[in-house]
Amino acid sequence: MMSSVKGLGAVFLALSVFVAAAGPAQAEEKPDPADVLKKAEAALKQAKVVRYKFVREGLKADAEKSPKITGTVVMSGWYRMFPKRFRLDAVSQQPGATDTEKLTAGSDGDVFYWFDEKSKKVHADMDPGVFGSRAQSLFDLVVGTYANPDPFEYEKKAGKIEYKGTSKVGDEECHEIHFVFGEHFEANYFFSIKDSLLKKFEWTFAQVPGEWSGSRVVLSEVTLDYRPEGDPFKLTVPEGFTKTDEFAP
């Protein structure tokens, strides 16, 4: 019996020496958000013709009044402030509504165009102002990050950039980066740990102090080297539509 006790004592002594030598457990070091952005930039250098699916929904005050938009975007190249060529095909549905609205817009590299389903007109012009009042909302869905040679030019100028941890977007584990651009303007970006690509982003802002609004866009099936059979950016006027260079309302 005494030999057994001595044996256990030796084991406990050895364990205590090992734990003392190891010291307290080290907390896992958080990734530097600047490094996460650099990896995303490096991944985007492989982009040629980009295609992705998306779901866009309102946040906070906009959650009950902003439409849910689902669709597909194809883009390639960059010119000044926009993708040089792109095509957006989507469906918009207002909260609580059963009917939907079809959204079709794009650029063939020379002409921007918007299909107005109600008037049956295709508004087409060299000026992106041809999109009318929808211009900003359309470019929120056409995520220029995937075509811009300096994809996070604006984000890197944020007043505060913070690593928030990891969370899942669909089945993908992602790094979450929080940006503060001002007292009333913030964003969260989610980058895939697997391929470093942007998979979700959330913008929140307060036009009136304390009253926050915003939107969330979730991206899926992102392809950086999409190879369509034909020209996905070509403007073809559908039967029943007429083409005009008038700007959309």
Image (cartoon, rainbow, N blue to C red):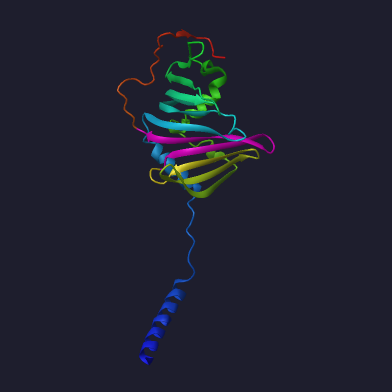
- Residue 248: percent from left, percent from top: 54, 14
Image spot of residue 173 (x, y percent): 43, 47
User: Can residue 179 be seen here?
Assistant: yes
Q: Nearer the viewer, residue 3 or 130?
A: 3
* Quarter in which the C terminus is drawn: top right
Q: Hey, which residue is sitting farthest bottom in the picture?
A: 2
Instruction: Name which quarter of the figure residue 220 lies in.
Output: top left
Res 129 → quadrant: top right
- Image point 45% across, 20% down: which residue? 104
Q: Magenta residues, as a range? A: 196-224
Q: In the image as oriented, which residue stretches furthest toward the left? A: 229
Residue 79 is at least partly visible in this image: no
Q: Is residue 57 magenta?
A: no
The N terminus: image quadrant:
bottom left
Q: Is residue 7 above or below residue 98?
A: below
Does 213 appear in magenta? yes
- Relative to 208, is 196 above or below? below
**Residue sitting at x 47%, y 31%:** 143
Q: Quadrant of residue 137?
A: top right
Q: Position of residue 20 (x, y in %)?
A: 46, 75
- Residue 10 vertical placement versus 22 (above, below): below
Q: Is residue 159 left or right of residue 100?
A: right
* Residue 32 on image: x %, y %: 49, 50
Residue drawn at point x = 44 percent, y = 71 percent: 22
Which SS type dominates the magenta stretch?
A: strand
